Amino acid sequence: MQAKEAAEKLQITQRMLRHYEKEGLMAVGRTLNGYRSYSAADLRRAGRIRDFIATGFSTREIRAMSACLSDEGSGPCEGGVEKLREKLEHIDRLRAELDDKRNVVIDKLAALQNGLATVSSR
Amino acid sequence: MQAKEAAEKLQITQRMLRHYEKEGLMAVGRTLNGYRSYSAADLRRAGRIRDFIATGFSTREIRAMSACLSDEGSGPCEGGVEKLREKLEHIDRLRAELDDKRNVVIDKLAALQNGLATVSSR
DNA sequence: TTGAACATTAACATTTAAGTCAGGCTGTGT
DNA sequence: ACACAGCCTGACTTAAATGTTAATGTTCAA
C-alpha cells in the first residue's frame, strides 16, 4: 500500500509518516520505482507511533522503547509499561476532575429542571 | 506560597510555572515585593495544566477549555471531555497492545520455567 | 502523448515546551 | 554591612512535530 492510502487509514499526514521514518521509529520498504510500500505490519507500527505521540511521548522516548512497537512480543519493552502508567495517572487525575465538574453541571441542570417542574406543576 | 515551593510540590520547574502564566493558562497574584504568590487553588490549577500538557495537549487546546481548569464547575468545558476521551482511546489502544506483549513475555518465561522445572525434576 | 494524480527528496518555516543565562531586586541571618 | 538565597524579567537556545513549498520522477487513462 502506498503513502497516501496509508496516511488516510491512519488519519495522519504523509509528512508525519515520513517523519516517523526519518526519526528512526520505523523502516518502510520501497517498490522498484522508489515509492514507499506500507505493509500491514508497517501500518500497525505507524499507528502505535501515532498513538504514542498523541499521548505526549517524544520520538526519543519512543525510540528508546522500540521493542514495544514491533508486532512480535520481542524485547523487554524498556520501561514502556511504567511510562504508560505515568501517563495514565495524569489522565486519570484529569478525568476524575472533569467528571466531578460534569456532575456538578448535571446536578445544576437537574435542579433547574426540578425547579421548573415544580413551578409549572403548581 | 512562593515559586520554589510551588514548583517542588508540583514536581515541575519554576520555568514551567512561568510558562503557564505567560501562555495565559493561569493568573498568579503577587505579593507587595512583586514575588509570585501561589494559592492552593493556583496549585491545583497548575497541576491540572501540567497533567494536560503531559498528556499531549497544547497550550492552545488547554486555553480553549480553560473552563475545565478552574476549581468551580463553571463553564461547559468546551469539548474537554471529548478530547480526553480521544486521548484515552490512544492510551487504551497502546495499553491493550502492551499488555498483550507483556503477557506473551510472561508466557514465554513461564514456559521456560516449566521447561526447566520439567528438566530439573526429571 | 499529454495531463492529472501521486510519488520522491530537500529545504525552509512555524509553533510549542522547556532549558539556560544575564542583570538586577529583595529579604534574612550574621 | 555583607553574603547568600530566592525572586524577577528578558532574551537566547534547542528540540520536536508539523506545515509548506519547490523541483522532479512515475503511472495511467483519455
Image (spheres, coloured by chain):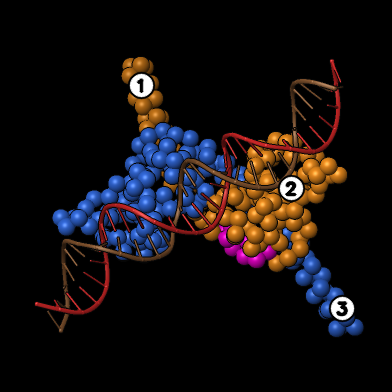
Chain colours: A orange, B blue, C brown, D red
Vertical relation: A4 (above or below) B31: above
Give the residue at mark 3. B118
Q: Is residue A62 visible?
A: yes
Q: Position of residue B28 (x, y in %)?
A: 27, 50
Q: Nearer the viewer, mark 2 or mark 3?
A: 2
Q: Does the magenta stretch include residue B107?
A: no
Mark 1–mark 2 CB contact (< 8 Å): no
Q: Which chain carries label 3?
A: B
Give the residue at mark 1. A116
Q: In the figure, is residue B45 to the left or right of D3?
A: right
At label 1, the amino acid type is: Leu
Where is the C terminus of chain B found, in terms of image quarters? bottom right
Where is the N terminus of chain B found, in terms of image quarters? bottom left
| Residue at the spot 31% in from the left edge and 64% down from the top edge | B4
Q: Which of marks 1 and 2 is in front?
A: 2
Vertical relation: D1 (above or below) B79: below
Q: Which chain carries label 2?
A: A
Q: Nearer the viewer, mark 3 or mark 1?
A: 3
At label 3, the amino acid type is: Thr
Mark 3–mark 1 CB contact (< 8 Å): no
Vertical relation: B32 (above or below) C3: below
The stretch of residues the image draws in magenta is A77-85
- The numbered mark at residue A44 is 2
Q: In which quarter of the image is residue B23?
A: top left
> Few, some or many C-alpha atoms within 10 Å of disc 2 (few <14, some 14-19, many ≥20)?
some
Gap in angstroms between the C-alphas marked 1 and 2: 53 Å
At label 2, the amino acid type is: Arg
Q: Mark 1 lies on which chain?
A: A
Which secondary structure dominates the residues rendered in magenta?
helix
> Few, some or many C-alpha atoms within 10 Å of disc 1 (few <14, some 14-19, many ≥20)?
few
